[in-house]
Amino acid sequence: MAYVATRGGENAIEQAERLFRQDLGTIDAARVETIRTTMPYLIDRVMGEASLYDEELAALALTQTGGELSEAVLVLRAWRTTQPRLAIARPVKQDEVLTQRRISAAFKDIPGGQILGPTLDYSHRVLATDVLEGKPFTPHDVQKAASPAPAKQPSLADWQRQQGLVAPAKVSNVSPEDIPDLTREPLLFPASRAHRLQSLARAETGGVLALGYAAMRGYGNAHPTVNELRLGEAEVVVRHPCGTEFTAGRVRVSQAEVTSKEKGGYLELGFAATFGWNEVKVIAAATLDLNSDEAPVGSPVHEEFYLYHTESVEASGFCIHFKLPHYVTFQSILDAMRDANSKKATADAMDQTHVAEPEVEPIL
């Protein structure tokens, strides 16, 4: 493609940005805090797609971009690249997560039980229009359970392994420092599973949902059943240079395992996890993971297709760049079209001048 730089418009460009900023108004710490506290699930989505867990910065990114998600993710990722990497956290294990929601659609009675947690799954979706008439909507207090569920819940997959339903776990000798890092290494195909899961963890939610839905509707080779869906908080455990391990804090995480395929006499599991609470993303992403290995090239559930087309910053950037001047490219299209039309008109004119005279029979 050919591009032509826009010249002579520096003042116009500056005024265009001022118009955008003027519509948003003044941005201050109080406004950022309001966004952070009132839109937790949106904050979670931005942090997950930006690969950076910082609620305050995610709220700031949303505030200064007017809630435009792809722009918010872009500026948060850009800020992330300026920061040093201080340490590698210890891997998080399922049974160590402080679980607030944990359900299974595959088994009714699971070790630890079903924990509904915070959800609208079983509620009517009704718009609270009374709020617009000056009647605040105040949620009811949560009733305390007589016997609260334990904060930590066992891994359902481990229980299934004990029943002979899932293949034994493979022991990995790879240290956390040696796990491939998608933010520092290019994505190559066929992708390692580490790269696949990292890419899905920061993929654009809408894109993952669209392609995961395509798999569910028959474009994949496995219709998912949610084996385990878990929302919780994970401890970030890092090692001090002196050798002591300590907790640097907690992050909200989502995790999903789906199944429906049998392989080698065992149930095959698709897996996905991400920062923040984003159930629809991890279910759709786990479905794509489950379908990846046997998907034909060109299929929407083939890893090269869905990993490329759910990369939010690259995809939105490529789409948005078409707004930039393409005068030379488009002029060449017009020149080719005019040339073809001119040649066609010339050919048609020549055909008209070479029309054969009708034959006249001689008079005997």
Image (cartoon, rainbow, N blue to C red):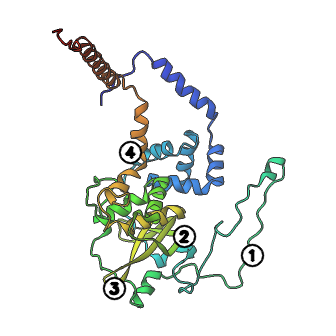
Residue visible at 34% across and 62% down? 196
Quick one: quadrant of the N terminus? Answer: top left
**How many other residues sit within 10 Å of disc 3, few (<14), some (14-19) or many (≥20)?**
few
Q: Is residue 122 above or below residue 13?
A: below
Q: CA distance from mark 2 to mark 4?
A: 30 Å
Q: CA distance from mark 1 to mark 2?
A: 20 Å
Mark 1 or mark 2: whose residue is earlier in sequence: 1
Check disc 4 and report the residue beneath it.
314
Q: Quadrant of residue 171?
A: bottom left
Q: CA distance from mark 4 to mark 1?
A: 46 Å
Amino acid at circle 4: Glu
Nearer to us in this view, 143 or 356: 356
Mark 2 or mark 4: whose residue is earlier in sequence: 2
In this picture, residue 79 sits left or right of residue 66: left
Mark identifier at residue 197: none
Q: Is residue 253 above or below residue 311?
A: below
Check disc 1 and report the residue beneath it.
143
Q: Do the CB atoms of the residues marked 3 and 2 lie less than 8 Å apart?
A: no
Mark 3 or mark 4: whose residue is earlier in sequence: 3
Q: Quadrant of residue 240?
A: bottom left
